Image (cartoon, rainbow, N blue to C red):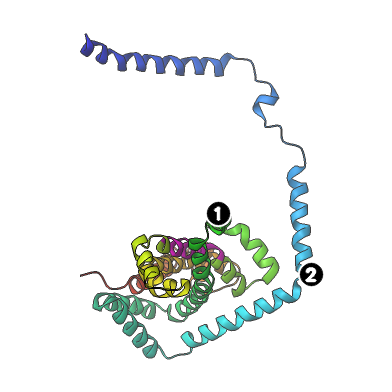
């Protein structure tokens, strides 16, 4: 009996589903129209325009009152970008290649150095060398700012549960808000060019290093902390000599993810005048040049992969 009942149950479910579908179709075809209050959400008319006008007024007020701050901040960003870009673009390419390969070999071994050499050869042979250096300068400035801000904030989140509760919604918004949304105030405050591109990239990439830094410190075993306390280590000594060294793999992963997310913003930043490899992708899209767009996109991918192999470090064993 049990086997028979179990075999009949799926048939009953199937007939029930068919009956529901038929009933729904008949209702859709022959039922009278539903009242408006059921089909349309009762939203107040003009609410979106009123709120948008208030936001515009707040942005205009900030532009007027904080104009000197934005000018100084833009000047600092331009100086940082100028120094990094001039160092990478004006330096002869053999020196850049030698330094990059030496760094890749020291950080990640011979295989990473060989792969990096192949990526650099692609950039040079297809004429993307200068544009790739411009792109990497923007990425380097963004990652530098993310590390300077993200490491202390990540340590704060690991040490203070209250700060973590307050900052988590902010990090969620920074990471999930569409990039074009905060490009609008970035352009409004910092004009077009590379500074707003850096700002947008930092907003998008910063949460990764904050979260992974906090995670790495939180995962330090309690017995290690207790041993440090038993030896009389002060809080700063425990942080610098015990917790941060043990959290280094997670911090390195955070830097890796920050670099990857910064490179993913290259095309978006090019839309507001940042230039670099993203500009070639945009121009190829505008003129439907599939081949050129593919080559420029592949150049961005190879830059990301080379940096990933370098930052990842030597494989264990």
Identify the residue under disc 2.
Answer: 65
Mark 2 crowdedness (10 Å alpha carbons): few <14, some 14-19, many ≥20: few
Q: Earlier in the sequence, mark 1 or mark 2?
A: 2
Report, in whole angstroms, how far the alpha carbon at label 1 lies from the one at label 2: 31 Å
287 sits left or right of 11 in the view: right
Q: Nearer the viewer, residue 42 or 25?
A: 42
- Which residue appears at 59% of the width and 74% of the height? 194
In the image as oriented, which residue stretches furthest toward the top?
1
Kindly identify the residue that appears in the image at 76 percent across and 59 percent down.
Answer: 58
List the residue tagged with mark 1. Answer: 165
Residue 54, numbered circle: none
Image point (30%, 15%), residue name: 9
- Callout 1 environment at 10 Å: few (<14), some (14 to 19), or many (20+)? few
Decide: is 81 above or below 55.
below
Q: Main secondary structure of the magenta part?
A: helix
Would you say residue 206 sits in the magenta stretch?
Answer: yes
In magenta stretch: residue 303: no
Q: Position of residue 34 (x, y in %)?
A: 65, 20
The quarter in which the C terminus is drawn is: bottom left
Which segment did they paint magenta? 203-215
């Amino acid at each position: 009996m049990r086997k028979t009942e179990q075999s009949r149950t799926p048939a009953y479910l199937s007939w029930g589903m068919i009956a529901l579908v038929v009933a729904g179709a008949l209702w859709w075809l022959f039922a009278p129209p539903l009242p408006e209050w059921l089909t349309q959400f009762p939203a107040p008319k003009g609410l979106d325009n009123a709120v948008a006008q208030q936001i515009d007024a707040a942005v205009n007020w900030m532009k007027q009152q904080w104009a000197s701050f934005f000018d100084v901040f833009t000047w600092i960003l331009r100086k940082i970008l100028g120094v990094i870009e001039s160092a990478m673009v004006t330096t002869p390419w053999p020196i850049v290649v030698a330094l990059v390969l030496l760094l890749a070999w020291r950080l990640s071994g011979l295989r990473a150095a060989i792969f990096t050499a192949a990526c650099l050869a692609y950039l040079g042979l297809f004429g993307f060398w200068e544009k790739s250096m411009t792109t990497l300068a923007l990425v380097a400035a963004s990652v530098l700012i993310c590390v300077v801000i993200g490491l202390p904030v990540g340590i704060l989140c690991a040490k203070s549960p209250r700060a973590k509760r307050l900052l988590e919604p902010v990090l969620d918004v920074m990471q999930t808000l569409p990039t074009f949304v905060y490009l609008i105030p970035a352009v409004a405050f910092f004009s077009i060019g590379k500074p707003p591109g850096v700002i947008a990239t930092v907003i998008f990439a910063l949460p990764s290093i904050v979260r992974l830094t906090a995670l790495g410190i939180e995962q330090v075993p309690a017995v290690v902390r207790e041993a440090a306390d038993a030896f009389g280590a002060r809080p700063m000594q425990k942080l610098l000599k015990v917790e941060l060294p043990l959290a280094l793999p997670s911090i390195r992963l955070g830097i890796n993810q920050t670099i990857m997310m910064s490179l993913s913003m290259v095309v978006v930043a090019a839309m507001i005048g940042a230039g670099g490899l993203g500009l070639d992708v945009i121009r190829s899209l505008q003129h439907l040049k599939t081949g050129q767009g593919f080559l420029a996109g592949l150049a961005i991918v190879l830059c990301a992969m080379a940096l990933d192999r370098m930052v990842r470090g030597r494989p264990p064993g």
